[in-house]
Image (cartoon, helix red, strand yellow):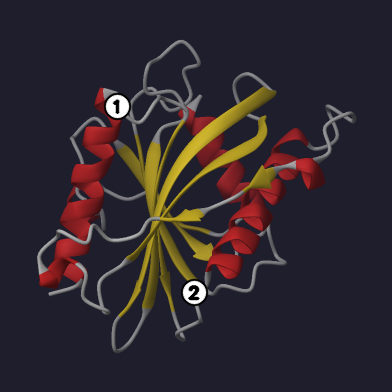
Amino acid sequence: MLRRFAVSLLMFGTLLAADEPNSFKLAAPKDWSGETIALPPGFAPDMKLKGHEHIRFAPGMMKSESDTFFSYAFVFELTPKPELTEAVVKDEFLKYYRGLCKAVLNGKLPDVDPSGFTLEPQRVKPDPKAAKDEIAADRPTHYTGKLDWVEPFATKKKQKLNLEIQTWTTNEHSYIFACVSPQPMDTAIWKQLHVIRDDYLKKQTK
């Protein structure tokens, strides 16, 4: 089933690499697969963000019975630097997921209307008790949100995806990192997603 995801990206996006383990941009457990695609992808040509997307998939990504079903982490490495406001993040993510669903279903479920998918990101305010370096102006902006959409690969049914999104900018690039899973936020998969995110963030914000 995961191969279907890769094939879909290849058909509807620009698959740059089905990465070898030693070339993954995102560090993850050995049984996590990954890919790199160009942005905007072919399935969402109306996206304005340009760059590359690096993705790591949990082992149960395409197994609907798994407790890691549709759980994955990805980062958009963007250039030139766009303004990553809350409105931009919401708009670009909806274009991405609407386009992906439409391309994969390819008219097989005519009653599914991707324009009805919704996402309402909420900015997470820094803890006022946190250390100063944790709330500095150049630290990532953190959002949470729920994406209501139709999962087009395995179930073709309505799904609520929990998202944690962080955005930040360096001298050369802007970044959007997302942890994604339908599982509750207190489950084990989120700890794994956070390790992947925190490792990447540490390397990019030194």
Residue at 19% x, 49% y is 27
In the image, residue 32 sits, relative to residue 138, either above or below, namely: above
Secondary structure at numbered mark 1: loop
In the image, residue 63 sits, relative to residue 47, either above or below, namely: above
Can you identify the residue that label 1 sits on?
Answer: 186
Residue at 29% x, 89% y is 171
Type of amino acid under label 1: Asp
Residues 161 and 138: in front is 138
Crowd rating for badge 1 (residues with CA inside 10 Å; few <14, some 14–19, many 20+) = few
The mark found on residue 84 in the picture is 2
Q: Quadrant of the C terminus?
A: bottom left
Q: Residue 96 in the image: state x and y as whole percent.
A: 62, 54
Type of amino acid under label 2: Leu
Residue at 22% x, 34% y is 191
Asked if residue 123 can be seen in this view, the reply is yes
Q: Quadrant of residue 135?
A: bottom left
- Looking at the image, residue 27 sits to the left or right of residue 114; the answer is left
